[in-house]
Amino acid sequence: MSDETHCQYHGQACVSCCGLFNLKVSPLQLRLLLIQRTWQFRRLQSRLHPPDMVAYRQNREAAEAGLERHDAEVYVCPFLGYLHPFQKKKPGCMVHPLQTGQPQGQNFSFYGASICQGYDCPVKDHDQKRVWPLVLEQVCRSWLTYSRLVCDRSLYALILAVLEDEVRLPLLNRNPQRRAAFLELCRRRLQNNDSQAMTSFQLDHTDYKQLYRKNPDRFMELADRVFAGGPSAVADQADRGVPVYEALLVESQTSFFNKHLAQVIDALRLGFRF
C-alpha cells in the first residue's frame, strides 16, 4: 500500500472506517483478532477465488458475531488484517488492489470496491497536504493511537481553531510547551467515549474557529465535551496493565493540565511556560 495517505502513512495506519474500534474489546484483543484474521486469510488456497472469499467472510463474521459493539449499525469488516503478518506492526485491507493486484478485490467486502476506494473521511478530505499525519506520527508509537486520532474531525477542527490554520500545525512538534499541551489534549481525547468508538463516520459540523474568535465561552463549553474523560469503555487492566492511550508520550505537566483545560488551550496557542 502507498505510505503517502492518512490511511497508510509511513509506519502508521488508520483502520477506523473498517469498523475495528466499534468492537468493545481491549487493545490486546484487537491485536489478537487481527492476527487470527490474517493467518486464516493467508491459509486460503486462492485468496481471490470467489467461493473461498465468501467462505472466509462468512466464517469470520460468525466467529466475531458475539463480540459486543458500540453501535449495532456500524459494520466491522473481517478483511482488515496485518499487511506483514510476521511483523504484526501495520494493519490494512487484505483485499486492497495494492495487496492483491486486483482492482475489484474489495467487492468481496460488505461495502464493495467503489465505496471502499472512494471514501475519504472529513479530515483526510480537508488536509490535502497531509500535515496532520506528519504531526501525529511524531507523538504516536502505535497504530492503535494514531488510527483513533488521525481521523478525529472534532479534535482536528478544534486544534486548527486554536492554531488558526494548518500551516501552524508543525509548531506542535517544534515548541516544547505546545507539544506538551497537544499531547495532553490527545491523551484526554483518547479517554473520551467518542474516541474509543471512533469510526471516522462521526459528523461534527461545529465551526470551532468562529466560536474561538467570537464566543470563547461557548468554545470552551464544547472543548470540555471533546476532551471530557469518562469511564473507560475498556478497563486498562485488560491489556496487561497498559492504558488505552498506551502509545502516547505524555509529558510531566499532566497533573496540572488535568485541572486547567483553558490553560492547556492557551499553551497550545501561545506556547508559554508553566
Image (spheres, helix red, strand yellow):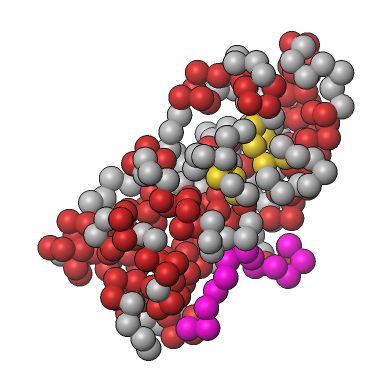
Count of all numbered marks drawn on residues in the image:
0
Q: Quadrant of the N terminus?
A: top right
- On whether residue 252 falls in the magenta region, the answer is yes
Q: Is residue 128 visible?
A: yes
Q: Is residue 72 visible?
A: no
Left/right of residue 55 with respect to residue 161 in the rendered view: right
Residue drawn at point x = 55 percent, y = 49 percent: 147
Q: Position of residue 35 (x, y in %)?
A: 79, 42
- On whether residue 107 falls in the magenta region, the answer is no
Residue drawn at point x = 39 percent, y = 61 percent: 170
Q: Nearer the viewer, residue 179 or 26?
A: 179
Q: Position of residue 66 (x, y in %)?
A: 72, 39
Residue drawn at point x = 44 percent, y = 85 percent: 256
Question: Which span of residues is magenta-colored?
Answer: 238-253
Which residue lies most toward the left here? 214
Left/right of residue 84 with respect to residue 231 in the rendered view: right
Q: Position of residue 37 (x, y in %)?
A: 77, 35
Q: Nearer the viewer, residue 171 or 24?
A: 171
Q: Residue 101 sits in which quadrant? A: top right
Q: Quadrant of the C terminus?
A: bottom left
Q: Position of residue 210 (x, y in %)?
A: 17, 56
Magenta stretch, main secondary structure class? loop
Q: Residue 74 sits in which quadrant? A: top right
Residue drawn at point x = 62 percent, y = 53 percent: 144
Above or below, comparing residue 242 to residue 62 in the picture: below
Above or below, comparing residue 242 to residue 122 in the picture: below
